Image: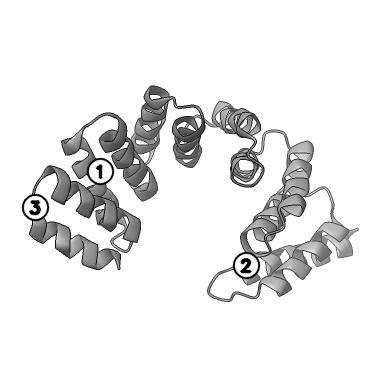
């Protein structure tokens, strides 16, 4: 048993290391996770990570679904797996009710999970047309983690598209770009805001150029 444990740790670690984008040895990582799960099929984290790999780099939706479900069967309190599974369900299976259920479960387990607040807000606005609740969850995400650039960007989009809050949108696009200056989408949308609502052609031009 101890030998299996050591072998399992080796394969699991190899799976994590080779999933690093800098190394991009995704086939090696896939093999490593398969070996790890063969040795220890009850490891929820390995199932979750393997599912991330399958959907992220092999476009294997059904395989990812199977392993997220297995991770949650082993550990129903696994917050990351609930969040990841919810994203898979809405992005690849158009299952908005399933996604809602799992985002809510993730936030029930950990109300301070800013990523799930952000993702749930996207679901609420895109698939339930619930602007007010989406706004609440973006605000909660940013209260928990003011450095969440994606939440700043998404919140800015919500404010200008649905609340006509030009100043609020400007503030959050600027914050998103302060945190992540390489976000082309934020540069582009901020440029649109500047030229449409602030008549600032020079600044807009600068951000359009950065978006390219």
Q: Residue at x 55, y 70 (%)?
A: 21
- In this figure, which residue is indicated by the disc labeled 3? 200
Return the mark for residue 129.
Answer: none
- In this figure, which residue is indicated by the disc labeled 2? 19
Whole-number angstrom distance, CA of label 1 to CA of label 2: 32 Å
Q: Nearer the viewer, mark 3 or mark 2?
A: 3
Q: Residue at x 70, y 69 (%)?
A: 29
SS for dot 2: loop
Quadrant into which the C terminus falls? bottom left
Whole-number angstrom distance, CA of label 3 to CA of label 1: 17 Å
Return the mark for residue 172.
Answer: 1
Observer-nearest of 133 and 142? 133
Q: Nearer the viewer, mark 1 or mark 2?
A: 1
Q: Residue at x 42, y 24 (%)?
A: 133
**Would residue 155 appear left or right of 95 to someone viewing this image?**
left
Quadrant into which the N terminus falls? bottom right
Whole-number angstrom distance, CA of label 3 to CA of label 2: 43 Å
Observer-nearest of 72 and 102? 102
Q: Position of residue 173 (x, y in %)?
A: 25, 48
Near mark 3 (Cα within 10 A), the count class, few <14, some 14-19 or many ≥20, is some
SS for dot 1: helix
* 147 up-or-down from 144: above or below: below
Near mark 2 (Cα within 10 A), the count class, few <14, some 14-19 or many ≥20, is many
* 196 up-or-down from 21: above or below: above
Mark 3 or mark 2: whose residue is earlier in sequence? 2
Q: Quadrant of residue 20?
A: bottom right
Q: Position of residue 157 (x, y in %)?
A: 32, 41
Q: Residue at x 62, y 59 (%)?
A: 56
Q: Nearer the viewer, mark 3 or mark 1?
A: 3
**Would residue 154 appear left or right of 52 to someone viewing this image?**
left
Outermost residue toward the right? 1
* 60 up-or-down from 119: above or below: below
């Amino acid at each position: 048993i101890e030998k299996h444990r050591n072998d399992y740790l080796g394969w699991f670690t190899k799976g994590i290391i080779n999933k690093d984008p800098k190394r991009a040895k995704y086939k090696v990582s896939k093999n490593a996770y398969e070996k790890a799960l063969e040795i220890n099929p009850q490891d929820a984290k390995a199932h979750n990570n393997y599912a991330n790999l399958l959907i992220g780099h092999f476009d294997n939706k059904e395989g990812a679904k199977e392993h997220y479900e297995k991770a949650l069967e082993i550990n129903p309190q696994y917050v990351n797996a609930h969040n990841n599974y919810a994203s898979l369900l809405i992005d690849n299976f158009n299952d908005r009710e399933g996604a809602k259920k799992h985002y809510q479960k993730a936030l029930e387990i950990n109300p301070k999970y800013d990523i799930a607040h952000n993702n749930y807000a996207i679901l609420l606005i895109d698939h339930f047309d619930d602007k007010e609740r989406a706004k609440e969850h973006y605000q909660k995400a940013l209260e928990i983690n003011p450095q969440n650039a994606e939440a700043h960007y998404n919140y800015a989009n919500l404010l200008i598209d649905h609340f006509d809050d030009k100043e609020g949108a400007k503030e959050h696009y600027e914050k998103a770009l302060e945190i992540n200056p390489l976000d082309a989408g934020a540069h582009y949308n901020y440029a649109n805001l500047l030229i449409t609502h602030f008549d600032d052609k020079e600044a807009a031009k600068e951000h359009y150029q950065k978006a390219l």
